[in-house]
Image (cartoon, helix red, strand yellow):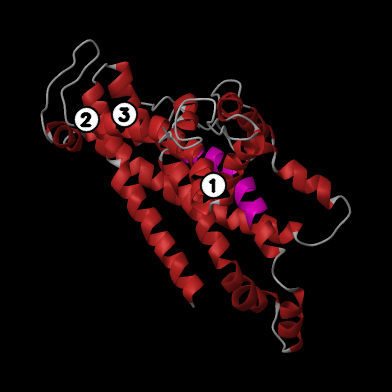
Amino acid sequence: MESKDRPGSGPGPGRLLPSPSDRHALPGRLLDSERSLAFLLLAPAVAMLLVFIAYPFATGIWYALSSVRVGDAGHFVGLQNLIAAWHDSIFRTALRNTILYTFWANLFKLILGMGLALLLNHPFRGVRLVRAAVLLPFIVPTVLSALAWRWMFDPTFSVLNWLLYHGGLIAERLPFLSDARWALWSAIAVNTWRGTPFFAVTLLAGLQTINPELHEAAALDGAGSWKRFWHVTRPLLRPVIIVVVVFSIVQTFSDFQLVYVLTGGGPANSTHLVATYAYQVGIGAGLLGEGAAMSLFMFPVLLTVVWSQLRHLRRLEGV
Protein backbone atom coordinates (compact mmCIF):
# COMPACT_ATOMS: atom_id res chain seq x y z
CA MET A 1 0.00 0.00 0.00
CA GLU A 2 1.35 3.43 -1.03
CA SER A 3 1.88 5.90 1.82
CA LYS A 4 -0.07 9.21 1.65
CA ASP A 5 2.57 11.08 3.61
CA ARG A 6 4.89 13.13 1.49
CA PRO A 7 8.51 13.59 2.53
CA GLY A 8 8.85 16.47 4.92
CA SER A 9 5.10 16.85 5.55
CA GLY A 10 5.05 15.00 8.88
CA PRO A 11 7.08 13.11 11.42
CA GLY A 12 9.19 10.26 10.19
CA PRO A 13 12.52 9.50 8.71
CA GLY A 14 11.52 11.09 5.37
CA ARG A 15 10.99 14.66 6.84
CA LEU A 16 13.17 17.35 5.31
CA LEU A 17 14.79 19.52 8.00
CA PRO A 18 15.85 23.10 7.17
CA SER A 19 19.47 23.21 6.25
CA PRO A 20 21.90 25.51 8.15
CA SER A 21 21.99 27.82 5.14
CA ASP A 22 18.17 28.11 5.29
CA ARG A 23 18.28 28.93 9.01
CA HIS A 24 20.84 31.70 8.36
CA ALA A 25 18.82 32.94 5.41
CA LEU A 26 15.75 33.70 7.57
CA PRO A 27 17.33 36.64 9.51
CA GLY A 28 18.84 37.82 6.25
CA ARG A 29 15.41 37.91 4.59
CA LEU A 30 14.01 39.82 7.58
CA LEU A 31 16.78 42.38 7.35
CA ASP A 32 16.32 42.70 3.58
CA SER A 33 12.68 43.67 4.11
CA GLU A 34 12.43 47.43 4.69
CA ARG A 35 9.31 47.03 6.82
CA SER A 36 10.87 44.40 9.10
CA LEU A 37 14.14 46.33 9.39
CA ALA A 38 12.28 49.53 10.24
CA PHE A 39 10.28 47.69 12.91
CA LEU A 40 13.41 46.18 14.45
CA LEU A 41 15.22 49.54 14.54
CA LEU A 42 12.27 51.46 15.93
CA ALA A 43 11.14 48.88 18.48
CA PRO A 44 13.65 49.84 21.25
CA ALA A 45 12.90 53.56 20.89
CA VAL A 46 9.14 52.95 20.85
CA ALA A 47 9.41 50.73 23.94
CA MET A 48 11.39 53.42 25.79
CA LEU A 49 8.88 56.10 24.78
CA LEU A 50 5.99 53.96 26.01
CA VAL A 51 7.65 53.17 29.34
CA PHE A 52 9.30 56.48 30.18
CA ILE A 53 7.06 59.02 28.37
CA ALA A 54 3.61 57.65 27.53
CA TYR A 55 2.98 55.78 30.79
CA PRO A 56 4.06 58.64 33.12
CA PHE A 57 2.10 61.12 30.98
CA ALA A 58 -1.07 59.02 31.15
CA THR A 59 -0.55 58.56 34.90
CA GLY A 60 -0.10 62.32 35.29
CA ILE A 61 -3.39 62.98 33.47
CA TRP A 62 -5.18 60.53 35.77
CA TYR A 63 -3.63 62.14 38.84
CA ALA A 64 -4.66 65.59 37.61
CA LEU A 65 -8.27 64.42 37.32
CA SER A 66 -8.35 62.66 40.68
CA SER A 67 -7.95 63.46 44.38
CA VAL A 68 -4.97 61.15 44.83
CA ARG A 69 -2.64 61.99 47.69
CA VAL A 70 0.29 60.25 49.33
CA GLY A 71 -1.21 57.17 51.00
CA ASP A 72 -4.66 57.73 49.43
CA ALA A 73 -5.59 56.37 45.99
CA GLY A 74 -8.28 59.06 45.70
CA HIS A 75 -11.18 59.18 43.25
CA PHE A 76 -12.17 60.94 40.04
CA VAL A 77 -12.86 64.67 40.59
CA GLY A 78 -12.92 65.93 37.00
CA LEU A 79 -11.47 69.42 36.45
CA GLN A 80 -11.57 70.36 40.12
CA ASN A 81 -7.77 70.32 40.53
CA LEU A 82 -7.25 72.46 37.41
CA ILE A 83 -9.80 75.02 38.61
CA ALA A 84 -8.24 75.09 42.09
CA ALA A 85 -4.78 75.62 40.58
CA TRP A 86 -6.03 78.52 38.46
CA HIS A 87 -7.46 80.23 41.55
CA ASP A 88 -4.19 79.76 43.45
CA SER A 89 -2.41 83.14 43.53
CA ILE A 90 1.02 81.53 43.95
CA PHE A 91 0.41 79.35 40.90
CA ARG A 92 -0.54 82.38 38.80
CA THR A 93 2.66 84.08 39.98
CA ALA A 94 4.62 80.95 39.04
CA LEU A 95 2.98 80.87 35.60
CA ARG A 96 3.81 84.54 35.01
CA ASN A 97 7.39 83.95 36.20
CA THR A 98 7.72 80.97 33.86
CA ILE A 99 6.62 83.01 30.84
CA LEU A 100 8.97 85.91 31.72
CA TYR A 101 11.81 83.53 32.53
CA THR A 102 11.39 81.69 29.21
CA PHE A 103 10.99 84.81 27.07
CA TRP A 104 13.90 86.86 28.41
CA ALA A 105 16.30 83.94 28.82
CA ASN A 106 15.76 82.78 25.24
CA LEU A 107 15.99 86.30 23.86
CA PHE A 108 19.32 86.88 25.63
CA LYS A 109 20.62 83.46 24.63
CA LEU A 110 19.73 84.06 20.98
CA ILE A 111 21.42 87.48 20.86
CA LEU A 112 24.55 86.41 22.74
CA GLY A 113 24.72 83.03 20.99
CA MET A 114 24.46 84.65 17.56
CA GLY A 115 27.20 87.16 18.40
CA LEU A 116 29.45 84.42 19.74
CA ALA A 117 28.81 82.20 16.71
CA LEU A 118 29.67 85.04 14.30
CA LEU A 119 32.87 85.70 16.26
CA LEU A 120 33.90 82.04 16.28
CA ASN A 121 33.15 81.72 12.56
CA HIS A 122 36.18 83.87 11.80
CA PRO A 123 39.63 82.23 11.82
CA PHE A 124 42.07 83.35 14.50
CA ARG A 125 44.84 81.76 16.51
CA GLY A 126 43.46 79.29 19.05
CA VAL A 127 39.95 79.26 17.60
CA ARG A 128 39.57 75.51 18.21
CA LEU A 129 40.54 75.89 21.85
CA VAL A 130 38.09 78.76 22.28
CA ARG A 131 35.29 76.75 20.64
CA ALA A 132 35.91 73.89 23.07
CA ALA A 133 36.09 76.24 26.07
CA VAL A 134 32.80 77.87 25.12
CA LEU A 135 31.00 74.59 25.81
CA LEU A 136 32.14 74.43 29.44
CA PRO A 137 29.07 76.15 30.98
CA PHE A 138 26.80 73.82 29.04
CA ILE A 139 28.51 70.56 29.99
CA VAL A 140 28.81 71.31 33.71
CA PRO A 141 25.91 69.63 35.58
CA THR A 142 23.09 72.07 36.23
CA VAL A 143 23.05 71.48 39.97
CA LEU A 144 26.79 72.15 40.34
CA SER A 145 26.66 75.35 38.29
CA ALA A 146 23.58 76.54 40.22
CA LEU A 147 25.37 75.91 43.54
CA ALA A 148 28.39 77.88 42.31
CA TRP A 149 26.20 80.80 41.25
CA ARG A 150 24.31 80.61 44.55
CA TRP A 151 27.61 81.10 46.35
CA MET A 152 28.52 84.00 44.05
CA PHE A 153 25.12 85.61 44.76
CA ASP A 154 25.40 85.04 48.51
CA PRO A 155 24.56 88.28 50.40
CA THR A 156 27.55 87.88 52.76
CA PHE A 157 30.25 86.06 50.79
CA SER A 158 29.30 87.15 47.26
CA VAL A 159 32.30 87.53 44.96
CA LEU A 160 30.24 89.72 42.66
CA ASN A 161 29.29 92.10 45.47
CA TRP A 162 32.93 92.23 46.60
CA LEU A 163 34.18 93.08 43.09
CA LEU A 164 31.48 95.71 42.48
CA TYR A 165 31.88 97.26 45.93
CA HIS A 166 35.69 97.48 45.86
CA GLY A 167 35.55 98.61 42.24
CA GLY A 168 33.53 101.61 43.35
CA LEU A 169 30.51 100.66 41.22
CA ILE A 170 28.07 100.16 44.12
CA ALA A 171 27.77 101.78 47.56
CA GLU A 172 25.97 98.86 49.24
CA ARG A 173 25.69 95.16 48.59
CA LEU A 174 23.12 94.03 46.03
CA PRO A 175 20.42 91.57 47.22
CA PHE A 176 20.77 89.16 44.32
CA LEU A 177 18.71 86.34 45.82
CA SER A 178 17.11 87.94 48.88
CA ASP A 179 14.98 90.47 46.98
CA ALA A 180 12.12 89.32 44.77
CA ARG A 181 12.92 91.82 42.00
CA TRP A 182 16.55 90.74 41.82
CA ALA A 183 16.07 87.01 42.35
CA LEU A 184 14.14 86.23 39.15
CA TRP A 185 16.55 88.28 37.01
CA SER A 186 19.46 86.51 38.69
CA ALA A 187 17.92 83.17 37.68
CA ILE A 188 17.44 84.47 34.12
CA ALA A 189 21.12 85.54 34.04
CA VAL A 190 22.29 82.09 35.15
CA ASN A 191 20.05 80.35 32.61
CA THR A 192 21.42 82.67 29.90
CA TRP A 193 25.00 81.93 30.95
CA ARG A 194 24.32 78.22 30.84
CA GLY A 195 22.35 78.09 27.56
CA THR A 196 24.32 80.53 25.40
CA PRO A 197 26.97 77.91 24.42
CA PHE A 198 24.24 75.63 23.03
CA PHE A 199 22.98 78.47 20.83
CA ALA A 200 26.51 79.50 19.81
CA VAL A 201 27.72 76.05 18.78
CA THR A 202 24.53 75.15 16.91
CA LEU A 203 24.39 78.48 15.07
CA LEU A 204 28.11 78.17 14.29
CA ALA A 205 27.43 74.82 12.60
CA GLY A 206 24.73 76.52 10.54
CA LEU A 207 27.01 79.43 9.61
CA GLN A 208 29.65 77.08 8.27
CA THR A 209 27.18 75.62 5.78
CA ILE A 210 26.64 79.03 4.12
CA ASN A 211 28.63 79.45 0.91
CA PRO A 212 31.21 82.28 1.39
CA GLU A 213 30.74 83.26 -2.27
CA LEU A 214 27.32 84.66 -1.38
CA HIS A 215 28.93 87.10 1.07
CA GLU A 216 31.63 87.96 -1.46
CA ALA A 217 29.00 88.69 -4.12
CA ALA A 218 27.03 90.86 -1.69
CA ALA A 219 30.21 92.73 -0.73
CA LEU A 220 30.97 93.39 -4.40
CA ASP A 221 27.48 94.87 -4.72
CA GLY A 222 28.34 97.31 -1.93
CA ALA A 223 26.57 95.60 0.98
CA GLY A 224 28.09 96.34 4.38
CA SER A 225 28.47 93.92 7.28
CA TRP A 226 24.97 94.53 8.66
CA LYS A 227 23.26 94.20 5.25
CA ARG A 228 25.19 91.00 4.50
CA PHE A 229 24.08 89.57 7.84
CA TRP A 230 20.45 90.67 7.47
CA HIS A 231 19.91 89.79 3.81
CA VAL A 232 22.24 86.80 3.39
CA THR A 233 23.09 85.16 6.73
CA ARG A 234 19.77 85.56 8.54
CA PRO A 235 17.49 84.04 5.86
CA LEU A 236 19.80 81.08 5.29
CA LEU A 237 20.20 80.51 9.02
CA ARG A 238 16.50 80.82 9.86
CA PRO A 239 15.71 77.04 9.88
CA VAL A 240 18.58 76.43 12.33
CA ILE A 241 17.43 79.34 14.50
CA ILE A 242 13.88 77.94 14.65
CA VAL A 243 15.05 74.48 15.69
CA VAL A 244 17.39 75.87 18.37
CA VAL A 245 14.75 78.21 19.75
CA VAL A 246 12.14 75.43 19.91
CA PHE A 247 14.47 73.15 21.85
CA SER A 248 15.47 75.96 24.17
CA ILE A 249 11.88 77.08 24.83
CA VAL A 250 10.87 73.53 25.75
CA GLN A 251 13.84 73.17 28.12
CA THR A 252 13.49 76.62 29.68
CA PHE A 253 9.72 76.51 30.15
CA SER A 254 9.98 73.20 31.99
CA ASP A 255 13.16 74.16 33.89
CA PHE A 256 13.29 72.90 37.45
CA GLN A 257 16.82 72.23 38.72
CA LEU A 258 18.34 75.67 38.26
CA VAL A 259 15.65 77.69 40.05
CA TYR A 260 15.04 75.04 42.71
CA VAL A 261 18.73 74.97 43.69
CA LEU A 262 19.31 78.70 43.25
CA THR A 263 16.32 80.14 45.12
CA GLY A 264 14.03 77.25 46.08
CA GLY A 265 11.17 79.42 44.82
CA GLY A 266 11.89 82.19 47.34
CA PRO A 267 11.95 84.71 48.72
CA ALA A 268 8.28 84.35 49.74
CA ASN A 269 7.40 82.19 46.69
CA SER A 270 8.30 85.08 44.37
CA THR A 271 10.57 83.09 42.00
CA HIS A 272 8.59 79.89 41.71
CA LEU A 273 8.24 78.47 38.22
CA VAL A 274 5.39 76.12 37.32
CA ALA A 275 7.70 73.10 37.68
CA THR A 276 9.10 74.09 41.09
CA TYR A 277 5.71 75.02 42.53
CA ALA A 278 4.11 71.82 41.20
CA TYR A 279 6.93 69.87 42.86
CA GLN A 280 6.38 71.71 46.14
CA VAL A 281 2.64 71.02 46.09
CA GLY A 282 2.75 67.49 44.68
CA ILE A 283 5.81 66.03 46.41
CA GLY A 284 6.47 68.43 49.29
CA ALA A 285 2.87 68.64 50.49
CA GLY A 286 1.84 65.20 49.22
CA LEU A 287 -1.05 66.56 47.10
CA LEU A 288 -0.22 64.49 44.02
CA GLY A 289 -3.42 65.33 42.16
CA GLU A 290 -3.06 69.11 42.52
CA GLY A 291 0.64 68.97 41.70
CA ALA A 292 -0.06 66.94 38.55
CA ALA A 293 -2.78 69.41 37.52
CA MET A 294 -0.30 72.29 37.81
CA SER A 295 2.25 70.42 35.72
CA LEU A 296 -0.40 69.73 33.10
CA PHE A 297 -0.75 73.47 32.47
CA MET A 298 2.63 73.38 30.70
CA PHE A 299 1.51 70.84 28.10
CA PRO A 300 -0.83 72.99 25.92
CA VAL A 301 1.65 75.90 26.02
CA LEU A 302 4.58 73.78 24.88
CA LEU A 303 2.45 71.93 22.33
CA THR A 304 1.32 75.24 20.79
CA VAL A 305 4.88 76.61 20.64
CA VAL A 306 6.32 73.47 19.08
CA TRP A 307 3.46 73.09 16.60
CA SER A 308 3.64 76.71 15.42
CA GLN A 309 7.42 76.68 15.09
CA LEU A 310 7.50 73.38 13.20
CA ARG A 311 4.71 74.58 10.92
CA HIS A 312 6.72 77.71 10.16
CA LEU A 313 9.80 75.56 9.51
CA ARG A 314 7.86 73.32 7.11
CA ARG A 315 6.60 76.40 5.30
CA LEU A 316 10.19 77.60 4.89
CA GLU A 317 11.27 74.24 3.50
CA GLY A 318 8.41 74.34 1.00
CA VAL A 319 9.49 77.71 -0.41
Tell me: residue 309, above or below residue 172.
below
- Give the labeled residue for mark 3: 278
Distance from disc 3 to disc 2, alpha carbons, whole Å, reads: 16 Å
Label 1 with label 2: CB-CB less than 8 Å? no
Give the label, 1 or 2, closer to the camera: 1
Give the residue type at disc 2.
Answer: Trp
Disc marking residue 37: 1
The verdict on residue 76 being magenta is: no
Q: Position of residue 128 (x, y in %)?
A: 82, 49
Give the residue type at disc 3.
Answer: Ala
Mark nearer the N terminus (1 vs 2): 1
Tell me: residue 9, above or below residue 309.
above
Q: Quadrant of residue 119?
A: bottom right
Closer to the camera, 137 or 251?
Answer: 251
- Give the labeled residue for mark 2: 62
Q: Quadrant of residue 79?
A: top left
Distance from disc 3 to disc 1, alpha carbons, whole Å, reads: 42 Å
Mark 1, secondary structure of its residue? helix
Q: Residue at x 56, y 30 (%)?
A: 142
Q: Position of residue 76 (x, y in %)?
A: 11, 27
Give the residue type at disc 1.
Answer: Leu
Closer to the camera, 243 or 226?
Answer: 243
Per the rendered image, the range of residues in magenta is: 185-202
Position of residue 179 in the picture relative to residue 191 (left or right) = left
Q: Residue at x 62, y 42 (%)?
A: 25
Badge 3: how crowded within 10 Å, few (<14), some, or many (20+)?
many
Asked whether the viewer can see residue 189, the reply is yes
For the N terminus, the quadrant is top left
Q: Position of residue 148 (x, y in %)?
A: 61, 26
Distance from disc 1 to disc 2, alpha carbons, whole Å, reads: 36 Å
Mark nearer the N terminus (3 vs 2): 2
Give the label, 3 or 2, closer to the camera: 2
